[in-house]
Amino acid sequence: MSNASHISPANNKITAVGGFRWTICALLFFATTINYLDRSVISFLKSTLTTDKGWDDADYANVEIAFKFAYAVGLLFVGRIIDKLGTKVGYALATGLWSLSAMCHAFTSTVFGFGVARSALGITEAGNFPAAIKTVAEWFPKKERAFATAIFNSGAGIGAIVAPLSVPFINAAWGWKATFIITGAIGFIWLIFWFLLYEVPERHKKLSAEERAYINSDEASAQSTVAAEEGTAQRKFSWFKLLGFRQTWAFAIGKLLTDPIWWFYLFWLPDFLKSQYKMGDIEVALPVAVVYLMATVGGIWGGWLPMSLINKGWANFKARKTSMLIFAFLVLPIMFAQVAGSVNMWLAVVIIGIAASAHQAWSANIFTTVSDMFPKKATGSVTGIGGMAGALGGILLSALVQKNMFVYYRSINKIEVAYYIMFAVCGGAYLLAWVIMHFLVPKMTPAKLD
């Protein structure tokens, strides 16, 4: 992974290129890990807040909706801001502000106060994926982008693993306020490494000429790429223009239908295990960690699969769409998770883990469709549009389904019915998304912005 081969057009010889781009990918991985750790903390404090503050499922859902709504609003602007400021400044600004927002949870104790803190976290955390996708587009040739995206996106799973293995213990030792402060402060450590190591490829002093040429191998030449970027850097592509392309709608609808499923895992999986199997805060840590460990491995495999197919001679779009169809089918068994769990709890955990793995594999590829179909100068904005659609999908799922449904079925002591319904929704979402995307962009033809 640290090295690659590149055919030099001058002498037609294969020359080794450096692997500094994977150092940049590692930075994206750790940023995404921190991002998901900060947003996951509250799901492991739900029972504590229910006991100490008298919250019910509706209160928790309202706080969750506040985060998702703010996340969606943030994505209205953050992609454009990052396209304008550039990845170095834009990513640093987003990380610093979301880390501060995470720490501010410790200074409130009401549902309204948590709603404000979660809103601040949602707006600022919206910067992670547009900045990361833009960075991948700048630092990797197309054939490596799905794999690089899968690696940094696996940070979502690692963050979700770190949360159950740390939050319950920090909470038990020092309380929920200290938990928010300690986990939130980690982002400031990342900022140190970001400023020490990051610069765009054209200006990076540690990047070899061979690796720079390899990164730009999709273009006619590195010189023409820089000239094109400089010549169009000030050109604005409004949302109205971007929304005029089927490519934008394919990405946005795919996110709208599938992002809410990951939100469901993230905010409700601990509650499912506690409600269904009467587990405590500490007991739930291991099965949740197993689910997200599986998701991490599956996500990396999801990035490797299309790259392997492309290396075998498949067209980019065929490799991408075939892989995504495989991932969509792998989610279907989650419909039977509770049936399997009635035999043994770990069977349910494994089935949910497979579905989470398939989601992360899907996610790595759907993100990569943006850089497949749009030029670098527009990737941040289009990623923001799709991310906003995903967050809106999460809001609708929480407000129209989870909030009322979970409160009702828990009130009649049949919470398992609510989870049967949710797992059925999870199972069908990806196939529906794949079919819609297929009809909108059968061959994922690049959008012609100019």
Image (cartoon, helix red, strand yellow):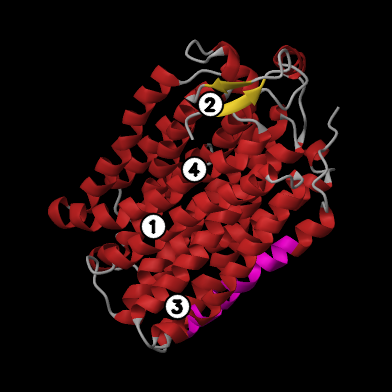
Q: Is residue 209 left or right of residue 107?
A: right
Query: Disc 3, disc 2: CB below 8 Å?
Result: no
Q: Residues within 10 Å of mark 2 (few under 14, many from 20)?
A: many
* Of the image marks 4 and 3, the number of the one nearer the N terminus: 4
Residue 430, given in percent of the width and then of the height, sits at: 65, 65
* Of the image marks 1 and 3, the number of the one nearer the N terminus: 1
Residue 299, given in percent of the width and then of the height, sits at: 51, 53
Q: Residues within 10 Å of mark 1 (few under 14, many from 20)?
A: many
- Identified at 58% across, 66% down, the residue is 397
Query: Disc 4, disc 2: CB below 8 Å?
Result: no
* Of the image marks 4 and 2, the number of the one nearer the N terminus: 2
Q: Nearer the viewer, mark 1 or mark 3?
A: 1
Magenta stretch: give its range.
417-434
Nearer to the camera, 123 or 244: 244
The amino acid beneath tag 2 is Gly
* Of the image marks 4 and 1, the number of the one nearer the N terminus: 4
Label number found at residue 293? 1
Task: Report the residue marked by disc 4.
Answer: 151
The amino acid beneath tag 3 is Val
On the question of residue 400 being in view, the answer is no
Q: Is residue 385 magenta?
A: no
Corner quadrant of residue 224: top right
- In space, the residues marked 4 and 1 are separated at their CA atoms by 13 Å
- In space, the residues marked 3 and 2 are separated at their CA atoms by 40 Å
The amino acid beneath tag 4 is Ile
Query: Disc 4, disc 1: CB below 8 Å?
Result: no
Secondary structure category for the residue under label 3: helix
Residue 449, given in percent of the width and then of the height, sits at: 83, 31
- Identified at 78% across, 20% down, the residue is 220
Task: Report the residue marked by disc 3.
Answer: 407
